Image (tube, rainbow, N blue to C red):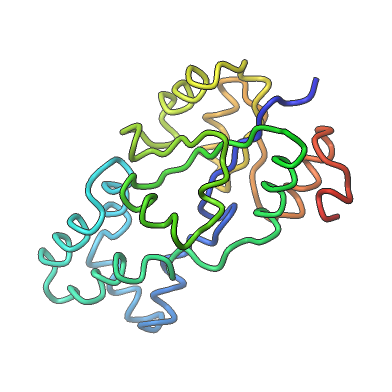
Amino acid sequence: MQPEAVIFDIGNVLTRWQPEAFYDRVLGEDRRKRLFAEVDLHHMNALVDDGALFRETIYDWADRHPDWAPEVRMWYDRWIDLASPRIEGSIALLRALRQKGVPVFCLTNFGSYSYEEARDKLDFLGEFDREYVSGRLKVSKPDPRIYQAVEEDCGLPPDRLIFADDKAENIVAAARRGWRTHQFESWQGWAARLVAEGLLTNEEAGL
C-alpha cells in the first residue's frame, strides 16, 4: 500500500541548515570554533525551536556574552544566510507530489516566530498541506510527543506516513511509531525512495 502523506523536515532537507559553515565564512574557522566553544548557540536555538521569542532570545543571549555580542546577534540578523542555500531538488519533489494530489506536510524543529519571519524569504513554506512546527507545538523532535501530535491531527495510520529527515535520532523515533522513514542525504536519494513507494515516476521525480 502506498503512503497517504509525505512529511518533510526543512533544515538540511529543503534548505541547508549549517550555522558552522556560515560562521566559518564570516569569521574564519578558528574564530568560529572559539565562538561555539564559549557560547552555546545551539542551546540558544533550541530555546527558539521550543517556542521562545526569536529576536528577543538571541539578543538576550548576546547581552549575556558581551565579548561575542555582534557575532551572536548575527544568528537573528542574518538568519536566512544560516539556512541557505535552498535544496531546489527537494523543493521540486514537494511540488511534484502536490501536483499529483499527494498531501505534503512539514515536521520541523523551527521556532514559531522564526518560521513566520521566514515565510517571505522561503516561498515553499506556504505550500504544505499541514504544518507541524516545534515552536508552535512546544515540543521538538525526537520527543515521541511531536510524532503523536502529527498522527492525532492528520488522522492517518503511522504506516501510511513517510518521513524524510537528515538526523538519525529523528528517523529512529518516527520508525518506532511505525512510520515509513528515509534518512535524507541527497534529494536524488529521496526522489528514488518516493519513486520506489509508487508516489512519483522517475520523470516526475527529476531522475
Name the foreground residue: 77 vs 143: 77
- Tell me the residue at 30%/70% (across/down): 77
* Quarter of the figure with residue 159: top right
> Where, by quadrant of the figure, is residue 178 drawn?
top right
Q: Residue at horizontal 62%, vertical 41%?
A: 164
Asked if residue 187 is positioned above or below residue 135 in the image, the reply reads below
Q: Residue at x 43, y 73 (%)?
A: 22
Considering the image in quadrants, where does the C terminus appear? bottom right
**In the image, is 103 to the left or to the right of 16?**
right
Judge left or right: residue 65 versus residue 144: left
Quadrant into which the N terminus falls: top right
Examine the image and state in which quarter residue 193 appears. top right
Between residue 56 and residue 185, name the one nearer to us.
Answer: 56
Q: Is residue 152 left or right of residue 94?
A: left
Residue at left offset 32%, top offset 56%: 42
Q: Position of residue 84 (x, y in %)?
A: 51, 67
Of residues 55 and 29, which is closer to you in this image? 55
